[in-house]
Structure formats: C-alpha cells, structure tokens
Amino acid sequence: MGKTKVGIVGCGNISSIYLKNGNLLEAIDIAAVADLDMERARAKAEEYSIPKFVTTEELLADPEIELVLNLTTPHAHFDVNKAALMAGKHVYVEKPLAVTREDGEKTLQLANDKGLLVGGAPDTFMGAGIQTCRKLIDDGWIGRPVAAVAFMTCHGHESWHPDPEFYYERGGGPMFDMGPYYLTALVTLLGGVKRVSGSAAVSFPQRTITSKPKYGKVIDVEVPTHVAGVMDFVNGAVGTIVTSFDVWAAELPRIEIYGSEGSLSVPDPNSFGGPVRIRRAGDTEWREMPLTHGYAENSRGIGVADLANAARNSRPARANGDLTYHVLEIMHGFHDAADDGKHYYLKSTANRPAPLPMNLAPFTID
C-alpha cells in the first residue's frame, strides 16, 4: 500500500518537527508545503527536501494531496480546515480544533457530510510515557482511578517566542495553548468528562515582548492567563487542573492519577517519553517503571500517520475529531463556568482512544 500524500499549510515554528518526522514515518509522504510567506515555505521545502512549495490555494487544488496538515495559528484553523474538507482532503490540525465550539461543530459536521476524517493535536498521548501509564491503569496497578491532578505553570511566551502575540489573543491563553496536552492525556487515561467548574483571571492586562524580533512591543491580553478547573469524569473520578502564564516558579507534578490501590505519576504530556513512576498501597517510596511502548523521543506527526492509516483501513483514528472537540468543549467549559459562576455540563462525549500496539517497528503505527 502506498503512502498517503500530505500537504502542510503553515510553515511556522512547529512545522520543523512535523517535517523532520514526516520524512521518516512509514504511512505518510509530505508532498508539498504552503504558507502566506512564500519565502518561508521555500526555505522549509529546501531544508526538508519537500518537492513543492506553493500557495494554500494551489495546495488545496492539487489532486495528489490526500490529507492536509493544518499548522496555522488558531484563528485560522477553522477556515483552513473548511477549505481542505471542501476540497475533498482529510484534515489533521494543530491544537485547538477551532477557536469556538461552533466552528468545531461545523468542522466535524462537514467532515461527516463529505465522508472524510478530521483529527488533531496533540498526539503526545500516543508516546511511550502516556501509553505506559495507560497500560498500568488498564492492568490494574493502581486499582480503580478515583482522582487526578494536572498542573501547567510558567510565565508565558513573550520572553522566547519570535511571534508570541497570538498566545494572548482569543483562542490562546494557557488553557487553549497547553490545556489540550493535559486534557487529552487525562481523557486517554480516564475517559470522557461530564461536568466542569472553573475560575479564571487576567493577572497582567499587558505583556511586553523581550524576545527578538519584536523586542519592546506591548501586547494587550485578551484571554485569562490563570485558569483553575475541576472535572467530573464519566467514570466517577474527580480531576483538578491549573494552567497558568502567571507563575515564575513552582514545584508541582505534571499529572498524577490516584487510584484505590495506589498512585501513578504521569510524565509531561507535552513530551512523548517518561519517567513513569508508581507508588502502590504499602510501598514506602516511588519506583520508576520501564516504558512498555515505543515513541519515547519527540514524535510529533504520529497522529497524522495514524489518521492516514485510519482513512485507508476504515478504522477509528486515535487523535480523532470527537476527542479533539471534547477537549475543546472542556476548555470552553472552564471559561464559561468562571464567567457564569456555575457548573458547565458537557454536551459532547469521547471514548478513550485505542492503545497503541506494543513492539511496533520504528516509524510504524499498525
């Protein structure tokens, strides 16, 4: 079976790792790149030996392209997703699926109407670390999961990112920027969420860029930069999450899952590897567990390969549209609960994505 031809729209910061891994993954072949800045597209094509750099319109009109990898900034996600689906292409989009729930719903409905697949980042939950945690939970190492905590704290991106403005615009903020990693991991490990509550604040209404090339530019902050939420999972577990761009330093776990027979320390969900640690009832200390799966290195792009295989083999994708939309609704739910002062009840559902097989050959999915 031949490889699925992929076209990338958006050649910014994140594209490099997708291009690097796309040259290695067995299921896909990156055939073209596009960007509003044609010089940037040309440079990426040359660096990663991609055959074509074209405009977005030319990429979408290319009958060779079967799947569009949408790496644009969040405010453009829906428009590019819609255009790709209208052109008859499957879509894999960087997080979030869309800025609004309405646009997320329209994306899924259009894909369904066209008989196409939509999926989206993150695919870090398919890496060795969280797949190992999934196996430990499924094999009963901590008993019945009863609670979880997740923390993502930093002081924002204006000190290092070359174009940090969109992190403080609608569709950005710590919840929409980093929340997808944490929430996707939690849904993978515990299942869907039925209800959330939350509190949120804009701690600093303006930010000053100290990175180049925009050093000194002042950003008006449009979104909450500190969000605290509580989740009621369908399985009965209760979760707590904090995402913040307002914290200089902290000593907090990334994710911990608490079960009836022990506790599980989950690695950074923005990475693919470990360490994975467990402490069972009666233990006097934590112990590190061996990783059970592959993809411990930075493997961004395996979700694209999985979506390509799903389309060819008529099976559900792991980083699928229902999962990405459920995460989008959870994030909006935290903000709505904070604004309205009451619980938000989820309208969407999501199943735990299938675990990856163990002992996969390098750069394969199935």
Image: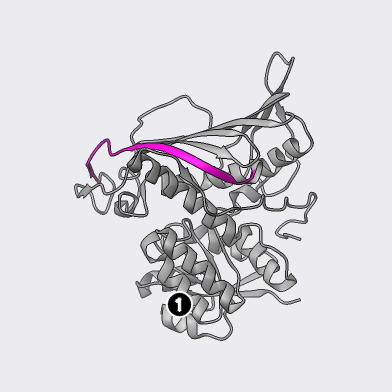
Front-most of 60 and 99?
Answer: 99
| Residue 22 drawn at (x, y percent) | 60, 65
- Which amino acid type is shown beneath numbered disc 1? Ala
Q: Is residue 356 left or right of residue 231?
A: right
- Decide: is 94 above or below 261: below
Tell me the magenta residue range: 191-208
Q: Residue at x 42, y 78 (%)?
A: 56
**Image x and y of residue 7, in percent:** 53, 74
Q: Quadrant of residue 246?
A: top left
Instruction: Specify whether residue 202 is painted magenta.
Output: yes
Please provide percent x and percent y for residue 165. 29, 53
Asked if residue 117 lies in the magenta stretch, the reply is: no
- Image height of 215 relative to 262, above or below: below
Q: Quadrant of residue 89?
A: bottom right
- Residue lying at 74% horizontally and 36% vertically, measured from the top left: 136
Q: What residue is pinned by disc 1?
A: 83
Residue in the image at 79% along x and 37% along y: 139
Whether residue 148 sits left or right of residue 248 in the image: it is right
| Side (left or right) of 243 relative to 204 | right
Q: In terms of secondary structure, where does tag 1 sit?
A: helix
